[in-house]
Image: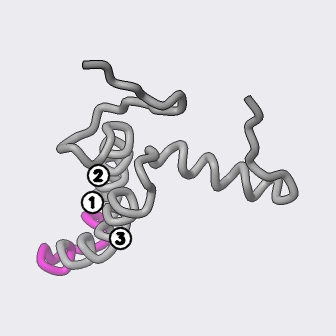
């Protein structure tokens, strides 16, 4: 049996099948950084947990659902590239 893969198909290993490793590592770094900041600012553990969940949950949801298989680093690079050159559209001629 032969399988035909499109030319632009890229295989990416994913953690638990839905988030790639680069995005998971970036999310982990952001989570640790946010946890350390909250640890310095808020003394009560229950309030710290509530604030952490409220601030970190949107980041996780964006990385899982809104990126369409891209890793978060290339997604933000694409946004920055677009903001720098608004008149130039993304077009790759083969």
Q: How many marks?
A: 3
Image quadrant in which you'd find residue 46: bottom left
List x then y, in percent, for residue 71. Answer: 44, 44
Q: Are marks 2 and 1 in contact (CB under 8 Å)?
A: yes
Q: Between residue 76 and residue 50, name the one nearer to us.
A: 76
First in sequence: mark 2 vs mark 3: 2
Question: Dot 1 corresponds to which residue?
Answer: 35
Numbered tag placed on residue 58 in the rendering: 3
User: Marks 3 and 1: which is nearer the front?
Assistant: 3
Q: Residue 49: x and y, percent?
A: 17, 72
**Secondary structure of residue under mark 1:** helix
Residue 83 located within the stretch drawn in magenta? no
Residue 39 place in picture, x, y as percent: 25, 64
- How far apart marks 3 and 1 lie (CA) works out to 15 Å
- Which residue is most to the right? 87
> Judging from the image, what secondary structure is the residue with disc 2 in?
helix
Q: Nearer the viewer, residue 8 or 59?
A: 8
Magenta residues, dominant SS class: helix
40 w.r.t. 19: above or below: below
The alpha-carbon separation of the residues under discs 2 and 3 comes to 15 Å
* 47 up-or-down from 27: above or below: below
Q: Which mark's residue is nearer the viewer, 2 or 3?
A: 3
Mark 3 residue element: helix
Q: Residues within 10 Å of mark 3 (few under 14, many from 20)?
A: few
Q: Which mark is residue 25?
A: none
Query: What residue does disc 2 label?
Result: 32
* Category of crowding for the residue at label 1, using alpha-carbon neighbours closer than 10 angstroms: few (below 14), some (14–19), many (at least 20): some
Q: Is residue 5 left or right of residue 8?
A: left
Q: Which residues are magenta?
A: 38-48
Alpha-carbon neighbours of circle 2 within 10 Å: few (<14), some, or many (≥20)? few
Considering depth in this image, is 46 or 29 the residue closer to the camera?
Answer: 29
Going from N to C along the chain, the mark reached first, 3 or 1, is 1
């Amino acid at each position: 049996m032969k399988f035909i893969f499109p030319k632009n198909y890229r295989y990416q290993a994913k953690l638990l099948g839905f988030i790639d490793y680069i995005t998971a590592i970036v999310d982990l770094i952001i989570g640790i950084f946010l946890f350390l900041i909250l640890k310095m600012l808020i003394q009560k553990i229950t309030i710290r947990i509530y604030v952490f969940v409220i601030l970190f949950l949107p980041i996780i949801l964006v990385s899982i659902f809104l990126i369409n298989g891209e890793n978060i680093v290339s997604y933000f690079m694409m946004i920055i590239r677009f903001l720098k050159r608004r008149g130039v559209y993304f077009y790759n001629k083969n």
